[in-house]
Amino acid sequence: MRNAIYALLIFCLLILFLPWTQNIRSNGEVLTLRPEQRPQTINALIGGRIEKWFVKEGDLVKKGDTIMFISETKDGYFDPKLVGRTEQQLKNKELSVVSYGGKVQALDARIDALIETGKLKVQQARIKAQQAQLKLKSDSMENQAALLNYEIAKDQYDRFEKLYKEDLKSKTEVETRKLAMQRAQASMISAQQKLLQSRNDIIDARVELNSVETKFQDDISKAESEKFTALSSMYEAEIDVSKMQSQVTNYSIRNGMYYILAPQDGRIAKTLSSGIGETIKQGAAIATIMPSNYDLAVEMFVRPMDLPLLKIGQHVRLQFDGWPAIVFSGWPNVSYGTYGGTVFAIDQFANEKGEFRVLISPDQKDHNWPEALRVGGGAYAMLLLNDVPIWYELWRNVNGFPPDFYKEEVKKNEIKKQADAK
């Protein structure tokens, strides 16, 4: 009996010197690495009434397969020929734009014609004014000649009358000179009238020139105003065309939304709307789908005090719900039914419980995870750290000391600093 006790004590003492792998243990959940591979909800892009289901729960669908057909519930879209009628309105509005464009071109031609005609009319009026100016000069010279003739005739008449009084000239000669003076006076008066008429003609020519310029400027301004009005109407029609083109596109797209399609390959997990004739709102969830192809991962949460021990690529041992396993947390090599994984990502912020999320992906060097594993299943993870004797691990846990990972990291940092200094 004593020998058996001694043998048991020696065996326990030897066990204390066996290697033990320090680890961090945490419960987790199976999910997928990529967001598009996770279960998603299929929503109705528009509101409507359920007319027909094309799938049932558990069906495998391909991308683009029809899930459901709904009918319209908004009175603004009841017309079955809505797209065709809108397209006809669009064509009419486009013809209106063309018509306004033709009117603008016609007004441009009219403005060009008015400008050319105005130039000719103004040039004609200016020539007429120049003619009046030349006539004024001619009449002025003729007036000066008639005035000079009158003065000469008057002087001759005065001299002859004086000589007649001295009996040096006959009365007939005096009367002849008087008649000549009267004719000269009449010519002078006529020349003065012509001069005044010429001056009046110059004023009329200037008034006519201003009138011609004003008239054609008004005509051009009116034509340009009509042109700008036509341009404004054309631009408004183009805006209406753009709006109606958008409406036609929207109506056509909306017609395609009556058939709700599968966004990707997957299996219908659950239908959230039921029955025929049920009304659903825009954006309402109608079913959930699980993608066919996905890359599994495990989500686990660690305490802040364990976070410095983690790094990307670190090895992890996993136990999944439904797969019996014999787990020795300190001897992973002899654990049965566990699977390998590596740390894929570590969150940089804590959740509402003060824990940090860690994502674990399959270890490509280890055996594959179970094919029957599903998203949402439970998992138990062990992050492996350093190998230490069992007695040291018991002593560390009794005293509440952290794992030796801290010491190893400090040593590595010191070695790195010394190398950088050299």
Image: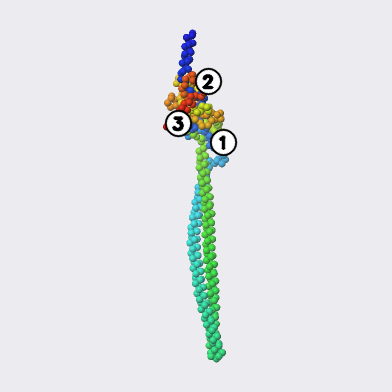
Q: Nearer the viewer, mark 1 or mark 2?
A: 2
Q: Which residue is mark 2?
A: 398
Q: Residue at x 53, y 74 (%)?
A: 195
Residue 294 picture location, percent across and down: 47, 30
Q: Residue at x 50, y 42 (%)?
A: 249
Q: Amino acid at mark 2?
A: Val
Q: Quadrant of the C terminus?
A: top left
In this rendering, would 52 be left or right of 366? right
Q: Nearer the viewer, mark 3 or mark 1?
A: 3
- Distance CA(mark 1)–CA(mark 2): 61 Å
**Mark 3 falls on what kind of element?**
helix
Q: Amino acid at mark 3?
A: Lys
Q: Please state which of residues 390 and 332 is positioned toward the viewer in this rendering.
A: 390
Q: Which disc is residue 281 wearing?
A: 1
- Asked whether the beta carbons under mark 3 and mark 2 sit within 8 Å of each other, the answer is no
Q: Residues within 10 Å of mark 2 (few under 14, many from 20)?
A: few
Query: Earlier along the polypeptide chain: callout 3 or callout 1?
Result: 1
Q: Please state which of residues 47 and 111 is positioned toward the viewer in this rendering.
A: 111
Q: Residue at x 54, y 37 (%)?
A: 46
Query: Earlier along the polypeptide chain: callout 1 or callout 2?
Result: 1
Residue 308 picture location, percent across and down: 50, 28
Q: Which disc is residue 417 wearing?
A: 3
Residue 275 picture location, percent across and down: 55, 31
